[in-house]
Amino acid sequence: MKTPGFTTEGDAHAKLSLPCCDCGIVTPSTCCDLGVQVLCCKAEVAMLPTEERPLGCGCCFVNAVYDDGIKVGVFKSLAEIKASDAAPLKAGEMNRA
């Protein structure tokens, strides 16, 4: 049985403990987290992006991930693209020929 009381332990700024439940205020790490896959199309987004769910999308065999700019890969997973040494494309660097 929990002891009723008020604490600020762990990641909680304020926490009220009752015998039936805990209620507290914590700093959010991710506000929303979404991953969708339909057939060969996949999209992942989190607000704030995390290592587990970076901002990226893919269709069939072409994938893109945002990592301080846009990185694109063909026949590579989002994790492989993010780990690659290729320089990301940044706004203003994409010129039309």
Image (spheres, grey):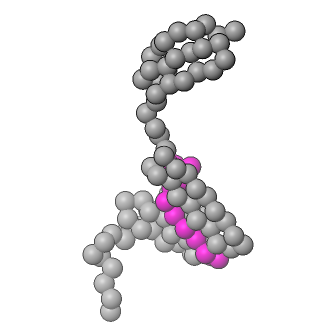
Write the residue at 45% across / 16% down.
8
Answer whether residue 63 is magenta in the image: no
- Residue 39: quadrant of the picture: bottom right
Q: Main secondary structure of the magenta part?
A: loop
Q: Is residue 79 above or below residue 18?
A: below
Residue 20 at x, y = what percent?
66, 17
Q: Is residue 10 above or below residue 45?
A: above
Report the front residue among 33 and 78. Answer: 33
- Residue 13: quadrant of the picture: top left
Q: Residue furthest bottom?
A: 97
Report the front residue among 23 and 60. Answer: 23
Residue 80 at x, y = what percent?
56, 61
Answer whether residue 50 is magenta in the image: yes
Write the residue at 49% across / 60% down.
55
Give the magenta part as a residue range: 49-61
- Residue 3: quadrant of the picture: top right
One can see residue 84 in this view? no
Quadrant location of the N terminus in the rendered image: top right
Looking at the image, residue 94 sits to the left or right of residue 67; the answer is left
Write the residue at 32% across / 92% down.
97
Q: Is residue 55 above or below residue 72?
A: above
Q: Residue furthest left?
A: 92
Q: Residue furthest right?
A: 39
One can see residue 95 in this view? yes
